[in-house]
Amino acid sequence: MTNTPSLFHRPALAIRLANQVLVVSAGSAASSGVFLAAPRRTGKSTFIREDLRPALLAQGAVVVYADLWANPTAEPGSVIVNAIRAALASNEGVMLRLAKSVGMDKLQLGAMSFDMDRIGLGSDVSLSEALVALSDETGKVIVLVIDEAQHAITSEAGIAALFALKAARDELNSSSHHGLRVVCTGSNRDKLAMLRNSKDQAFFGAPMVNFPVLGREYIDWFCEKVNLPFALDPEQIWPIFIEAGHRPELLGAAADLIRFDFEVDAETGPQLFISHVRHLAAEMNQVLLSVIHSLTPIQSAVLRVMAACEPEYAPFEAATLEKYRQALMRAGIPEAEAKADIPGVQQALIALQDKKLVWRAARGVYAVEEKNIVDLLKAEGLIEQN
Ligand SMILES: Nc1ncnc2c1ncn2[C@@H]1O[C@H](COP(=O)(O)OP(=O)(O)OP(=O)(O)O)[C@@H](O)[C@H]1O
Ligand SMILES: [Mg+2]
């Protein structure tokens, strides 16, 4: 592990966000939930776990946290259900209520404790009933935080879980209970937006907030704590942090490289640190670029057209097929061979998903996996004009 100081906290931001989540003013759609979006590796999960969760708890909320990315093979719907089950299981009074609701009496409950499998989608106890029991027993507002929430719409069970949550939210936010707020985070605005843009989505109209990335205060803190044989000047480090996409790991990794370099001195140190950060950032892009450059012509054309058309990308429409053809020709494929048909495009989309360049929602909507990929395509002059 790195010796870099552990964590920079943002308590003021956490309190402000917690207030926004908990206090819903009349007519505000915020009771639908709040969406926080920021690029990859900029500290979303860390902030939620280390700063926002404590702030919500301090304001008297029950916090349920579900990370849909912690285990990429886990089905998103069951991750949400399990997080809720775990919150219920930690409260005996709630378990008793639930047991009663399915006809078990106190004695039975003592003998053969209530089976958690009975709670969930299509089970005896719906998510809504379970959350109502938790709300009534604790008398507290419940905040469900779903990290990387866009994964919920990659499976039918995930979509079902979102609908169940919508029902639960409507019930708990009625005057007879204590409220349910849902906070969703994700790294891709377009994907997150799919959870809230259409009326049949569970969080229609929920506000999308640009989650603030780590700022200048983080850099002051980092330079003070980094503990290298020489001092780093925040004035110099701040611009390089912006250039590196506000990703703390790159600074940490550059500091580690310097720690193992015994030749470095106070004179050359800061400049070397900066060039390490640049180099590490370029290296990350290089990996991605080599994946992009190893695509087949049709895969590359599909990716480039998708990046150019988002968010209105319609993979199989005639006009889009024509765009692939144009993209193939621009990449040097002779006109006679520049063909894009539906089975070919389908195959290309599957391959692009396997390479983690493209993401597919359960209902056949596609998006480029990360904004970084689009930026890189632009920088390389590879994006097709509409
Ligand atoms: N406040 C902080 N202080 C110090 N280091 C941080 C802070 N926030 C994040 N980091 C570091 O940055 C890296 C990325 O953090 P984190 O996983 O929270 O980001 P993320 O935006 O959730 O990433 P992903 O897009 O992969 O979900 C981690 O190595 C973490 O230790
Ligand atoms: Mg994260």
Image (cartoon, rainbow, N blue to C red):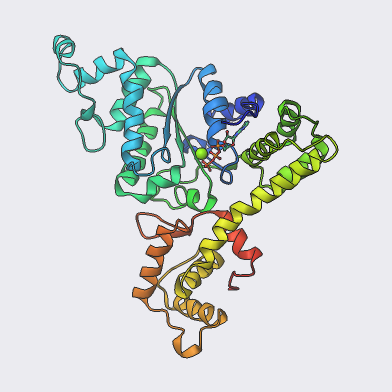
Q: Which residue is at 18% across, 10% downward? A: 110
Q: Report the side of 32 relative to 237 (left or right).
A: left
In what quadrant of the picture does the C terminus appear? bottom right
Task: Farthest residue to the bottom: give it.
Answer: 336
In what quadrant of the picture does the N terminus appear? top right
**Residue 143 vertical position relative to residue 38 in the rendered view, above or below:** above
Q: Quadrant of residue 251?
A: top right
303 and 200: which one is in front?
Answer: 303
Q: Which residue is at 43% across, 62% downward? A: 352
**Residue 108 vertical position relative to residue 326 in the rendered view, above or below:** above
| Ligand 1 quadrant in view | top right
Q: Position of residue 75 (x, y in %)?
A: 32, 43
Q: Position of residue 46 (x, y in %)?
A: 55, 32
261 and 279: which one is in front?
Answer: 261
Q: Which residue is at 55% across, 26% downward? A: 50
283 and 301: which one is in front?
Answer: 283
Q: Answer whether residue 22 is visible to the viewer in this image.
A: no
Q: Which residue is at 36% across, 23% downward? A: 87
34 and 36: which one is in front?
Answer: 36
Q: Report the side of 174 relative to 217 (left or right).
A: left
Q: Position of residue 142 (x, y in %)?
A: 43, 25
Q: Position of residue 20 (x, y in %)?
A: 58, 30
